[in-house]
Image (cartoon, rainbow, N blue to C red):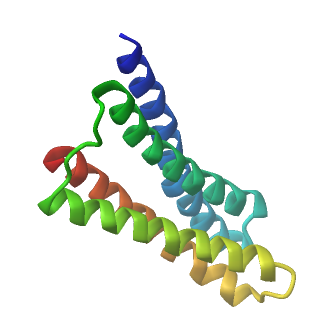
Amino acid sequence: MAAETAYALVQVAHNFGAVAVVGSPAAAWLWVREQRRAPSVLMWLVGVGWWLQIASGVGFAATSYLSRGELPETSGVALIALSIKVGCAICALSMVGVYAWRRHTQGLQSQIWVWPILSAIGAVALVNAALLRWFG
């Protein structure tokens, strides 16, 4: 029972992270198209969402290891999907870091292009999450 509860709590955190990594850039993208500048809090939500994705991904592995004594066996399509998700997290967090570092010197052009790219990265990660779930 404790393992199921732990897994469910990790899944809740993972779901909230997924909402942040997909919803925040999508909202900002719409905002930028109308207002020409998105609130910086949306970028922070993207960053927190990706860190939550990473932490909860580690949480899935830890829960599995602590409850079964081994990590989940991942191969084939699931391993590729997991690799793509990790790559998405690295790319997105890199973009968030550059954005935070340069936010005061960036022109409006950089505000416009960053959001659709982050939206696409989030969508790719979600598709691969489904593949990982199905084939993992």
Q: Where is residue 59 in the image (x, y as percent from the top left)?
A: 46, 39
Q: Where is residue 63 in the image (x, y as percent from the top left)?
A: 40, 32
* Residue 124 visible in this rendered orientation of the protein: no
Q: Quadrant of residue 42?
A: bottom right
* Residue 129 visible in this rendered orientation of the protein: yes
Q: Which residue is drawn at 37% across and 61% down?
A: 125
Q: Residue at x 37, y 62 (%)?
A: 85
Q: Residue at x 20, y 54 (%)?
A: 131
Tally of marks = 0
**Residue 120 left/right relative to 31:** left
The N terminus - image quarter? top left
Q: Which residue is drawn at 71% across and 58% down?
A: 44
Measured along the vertical axis of the image, is residue 17 above or below residue 34? above
Q: Where is residue 66 in the image (x, y as percent from the top left)?
A: 39, 29
Query: Which residue is at the front of the view, 127 or 27?
Result: 127
Q: In which quarter of the image is residue 99?
A: bottom right
Q: In which quarter of the image is residue 39?
A: bottom right
Q: Position of residue 119 (x, y in %)?
A: 48, 67
Query: Which residue is at the front of the view, 130 or 77?
Result: 77
**Residue 40 left/right relative to 26:** right
Query: Which residue is at the front of the view, 84 or 20?
Result: 84
Residue found farthest to the top: 1
Residue found farthest to the right: 104
